[in-house]
Image: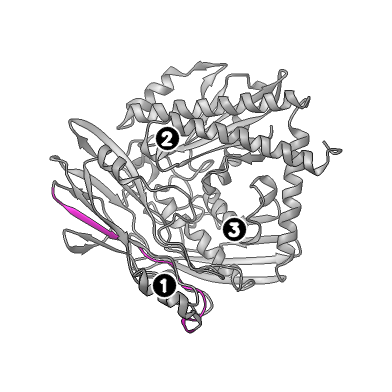
């Protein structure tokens, strides 16, 4: 592989991504739940035999691609490479070696070519249910949050672990959806395995090491060049976010140190682990911190292990960004998404003209469960605030960031669960003003139509700390939740009855640059479109 010219490397790299994209499409089309099929809350990846990330599906969740290599390395510690056989599939949802909370299942299958282990096919997907108290803000430990699956073989030499399947089905509210999605993930891994083996055979390669090392080394060199363009030094920031259990905010102290081609992010000084689910395991913290850096420094290069090699990310054990087991972690996205804000706020000290304003993160996941026509249902669906303004243009309204899950279409949502969408509209004036305006938040009004009570959980944020503007830009709007016209907080699950209406007003992004520098043409467009 060392003698391959750059064009051939690019062709092979692109072919590999195409194989993974085909597998991801198969997962999407054969899945059962709306969270996978409509929200695209999944990813697929090919990894080297030692667990290094080589290539991923084009459409992937940042946290999943950040944690999957860590999961495969943990799988290998329990099931060493020499013990694996064709047809094996390993599974776990352990938050501390995976994506950070129990609803995400991680699968990996060894890829064999010519009787030789040449890599792993990995997939992760968010399940519609995993048992326990669905995303309850008052959960105190992980035992309340659902079924814990240690590192086990879901398939062994092609034979399905029926006992494990039965345990999973018995512990979830929607067993057909969950087991159907698991089957879709297994199928995606099989598709990747077949595709990679076929690619190696076509190019007469004995294994994937040469190509993997070339891809990873090229990406590492590109990231090092990008880091080298940042002025050496130490930069710090403090990002405050809402907590569930007190009037005191959670604090993210972020310190970035640049030395040549190496970059270190340290969250020392951040708030301690707390007794609510607002805890982000270290792997999740690292994933979204790395993602923030890649967005600013190297957005054009496909992601793989090389992008993270020059970067070190740490947080004190026992902090809410690196909690100890058995902490409650279900709401890890509600705080972990702010790692992107914290890194942006710090990196802006070094690169003020390149870092966007803060966004109206995190995305909002409505977790709803109950009965629908005498059948139990359990689902999660997403809505988004506005993105922060960019250095050269307005922020995008109601777009998912830093994760990239999709919003469930209204028609699909109303068909699947007992709700009616009364309103789904932009919130004029919610984006922070500036030379470039922050993206708008939105207003979502849901009416319950079920004759039986349903449980709805909203993990709210930005109730007290709006998205910050950058370089003189103004802050975005705060969030509001209203139940039957009365403002409420999302600190406890809502038990709703037929006719109840819950309204969520999602925050807008911060502005970029002084508002006096906004051009008359852009001001006129704002007025014409009703955005101010």
Q: Find the distance from the CA under tag 2 to the CA under tag 1.
A: 52 Å
Main secondary structure along the magenta-highlighted residues: loop
Element assignment for label 1: helix
Q: Which residue is mark 3?
A: 295
Name the residue rendered at 25%, 50% in the picture: 493
Image quadrant for the N terminus?
top right
Element assignment for label 2: loop
Q: Which residue is mark 1?
A: 525
Which label sits in the foreground, 1 or 3?
1
Q: Judge by depth and name the residue closer to the eye, 187 or 465.
A: 187
Which label sits in the foreground, 2 or 1?
1
Q: Find the distance from the CA under tag 3 to the CA under tag 2.
A: 33 Å
- x then y, percent, for residue 258: 70, 66
Q: Residues within 10 Å of mark 1 (few under 14, many from 20)?
A: few
Asked whether residue 363 is in view, the answer is: yes
Name the residue rendered at 36%, 74% in the picture: 527
Residue 148 - label: 2
Asked whether residue 152 is in view, the answer is: no
Label 2 vs 1, first from the N-terminus: 2
Name the residue rendered at 47%, 56% in the picture: 401
Q: Quadrant of residue 76?
A: top right
- x then y, percent, for residue 117: 69, 25
Label 3 vs 2, first from the N-terminus: 2
Above or below for 35 versus 158: below
Q: Residues within 10 Å of mark 3 (few under 14, many from 20)?
A: some
């Amino acid at each position: 592989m060392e003698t391959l010219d750059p064009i051939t490397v690019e062709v092979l790299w692109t072919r590999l991504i195409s194989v993974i994209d085909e597998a991801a499409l198969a997962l999407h089309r054969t899945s059962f739940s709306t969270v996978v099929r409509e929200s695209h809350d999944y990813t697929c990846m090919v990894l080297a035999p030692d667990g290094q990330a080589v290539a991923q599906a084009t459409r992937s969740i940042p946290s999943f691609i950040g944690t999957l290599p860590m999961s495969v390395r943990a799988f290998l510690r329990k099931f060493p490479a020499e013990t694996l056989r064709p047809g094996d599939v390993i599974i776990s949802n352990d938050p501390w070696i995976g994506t950070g909370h129990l609803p995400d299942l991680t699968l990996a299958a060894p890829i064999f070519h010519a009787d030789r282990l040449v890599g792993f096919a990995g997939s992760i997907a968010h399940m519609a249910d995993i048992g326990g108290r669905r995303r309850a803000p008052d959960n105190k430990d992980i035992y309340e949050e659902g079924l814990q699956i240690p590192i086990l073989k879901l398939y062994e030499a092609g034979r399905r672990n029926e006992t494990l399947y039965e345990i999973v089905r018995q512990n979830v509210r929607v067993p057909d959806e969950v087991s159907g999605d698991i089957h879709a993930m297994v199928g995606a891994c099989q598709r990747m395995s077949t595709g990679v083996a076929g690619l190696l055979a076509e190019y007469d390669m004995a294994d994937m090491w040469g190509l993997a090392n070339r891809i990873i080394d090229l990406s590492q060199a590109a990231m090092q060049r990008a880091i080298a363009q940042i002025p050496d030094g130490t930069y710090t920031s403090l990002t405050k976010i809402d907590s569930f259990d007190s009037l005191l905010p959670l604090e993210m102290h972020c310190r970035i140190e640049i030395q040549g081609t190496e970059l270190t992010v340290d969250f020392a000084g951040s708030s301690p682990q707390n007794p609510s689910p607002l805890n982000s395991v270290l792997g999740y913290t690292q994933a979204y911190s790395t993602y923030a850096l890649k967005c600013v420094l190297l957005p054009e290069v496909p992601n793989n292990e090389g992008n993270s090699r020059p970067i070190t990310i740490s947080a004190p054990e026992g902090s809410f960004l690196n909690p100890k087991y058995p902490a409650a972690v279900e709401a890890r996205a509600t705080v972990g998404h702010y790692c992107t804000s914290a890194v942006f706020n710090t990196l802006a000290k070094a690169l003020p003209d390149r870092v966007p304003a803060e966004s109206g993160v995190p995305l909002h996941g409505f977790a709803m469960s109950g009965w629908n026509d005498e059948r139990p249902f359990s689902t999660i669906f997403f809505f988004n605030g506005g993105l922060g303004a960019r250095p050269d243009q307005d922020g995008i309204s109601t777009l998912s960031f830093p994760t990239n899950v999709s919003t469930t279409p209204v028609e699909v949502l109303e068909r699947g669960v007992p709700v009616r969408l009364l309103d789904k509209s932009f919130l004029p004036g919610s984006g922070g003003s500036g030379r470039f305006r922050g993206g708008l938040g939105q207003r979502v009004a849901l009416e319950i139509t079920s004759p039986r009570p349903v449980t709805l959980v909203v993990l709210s944020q930005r109730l007290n700390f709006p998205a910050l503007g950058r370089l003189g830009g103004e802050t975005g709007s705060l969030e509001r939740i209203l139940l039957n016209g009365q403002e409420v907080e999302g600190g406890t699950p809502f038990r709703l009855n037929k006719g109840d209406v819950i309204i969520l007003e999602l925050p807008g992004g911060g502005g970029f640059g002084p508002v006096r520098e906004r051009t008359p043409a852009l001001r006129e467009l704002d007025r014409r479109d009703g955005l101010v």
